[in-house]
Amino acid sequence: MAGFAVIDFETANEQRGSPCAVGYALVEGLEVVSSDAFLIRPPEFRFESFNVSLHGVTSDMCRSAPAWPDALGRLTDIIESRLVVAHYAPFDIGVIQDACALSDTPYPELRFACTRQISRCVWPELGSYSLPDVVSHCQAGEFDHHDAKADALAAAAIAAAATRAKGADSLDDLIDLLHIAVGTLHEGQYVGSHRPRSMQGGHGTYTAVPRNPSEGAVADPDHPFYGKKIAFTGGMMSMTRQQAQQAVVDVGGRGISSVSKLTDFVVVGGEFHGLLAGHEASSKLEKALDLREQGCKVELLDEVDFLSVLSPDPPNNCLIR
């Protein structure tokens, strides 16, 4: 039976590109044959107390850990040519992308799949697809959530349970049965894993979040986005996400790739119209709503509101007025 490798990253701060630990599990015939975890010195050596409170990995623990290029080399040697699996793969593969960008390290060549996506297909009746909730549904036992090795083993258990639930012989067979396209990372490009019906969801080649203002742009200290951290979820109808992120940078804000307690705004793209009325939310929107319940001041904007705040006079090629 075909094997696969499960990975799970923990990060030092609110940025995806700050890996401080990675756990892995190698699976053959739906049985774990090897698992472990190791620490990483993140490209930007900055640890946020919120992240440390989740996973317990401190700056002192990582001070002498291998830097990202060496850690990535070690991980790819372990994975070899196996299919890579993670629970919410866009985050874990995103960690690799962003850490490579920060350290000027070439992307590894990977094929990957997502157990969260697989779980949605196999168990559509679940109310939540968080790692603990899916593990509980699979009756895979208790585990230490946010411990990198424990999370990797939990995702491996989900992949095995989903494969058995559908009567497939291997995870590869299950992915074929569910008509899921395996994601790829290679030569500086990212193509997400998706089902055919989700191809309209804006998946495609990954581009890094813009950091530098456009030529001639002048930041405005009085602009509502000045100095603010802004995340985007859902496909934008009026412009590409990178164009929206660039527009934020040009007025003095910062586009970010993930949602944390330090996020100021989450922009819900027109593709997800109606989500705030109770439709199925993206993981970023779920995180933002959870943070708001905890008292964090994360403001939600739909695409029309975002454009209104960004500029009272939208560009001529804007589709939303």
Image (spheres, rainbow, N blue to C red):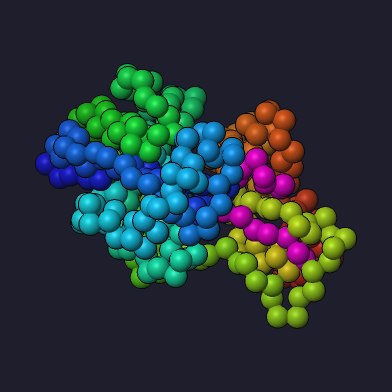
**If the image is split into quadrants, where does the N terminus sit?**
top left
Is residue 235 left or right of 153 when viewed as pictured? right
- Residue nearest the observer in this picture, 182 or 316: 182
**If the image is split into quadrants, where does the C terminus sit?**
bottom right
x, y percent for residue 24:
29, 42
x, y percent for residue 188:
40, 69
Q: Does residue 164 sit above or below 273 in this rendering?
A: above
Farthest residue, direction right: 222
x, y percent for residue 97:
44, 60
Magenta-tinted stretch? 251-265
Residue 120 appears in the figure? no
- Residue nearest the observer in this picture, 267 or 167: 267
Q: Residue at x 24, y 38 (%)?
A: 35
Is residue 131 left or right of 248 when viewed as pictured? left
Q: Residue at x 32, y 19 (%)?
A: 141
Farthest residue, direction bottom: 216
Farthest residue, direction left: 1
Residue 88 appears in the figure? yes
x, y percent for residue 42:
46, 55
Q: Residue at x 75, y 80 (%)?
A: 216
Is residue 53 left or right of 239 when viewed as pictured? left
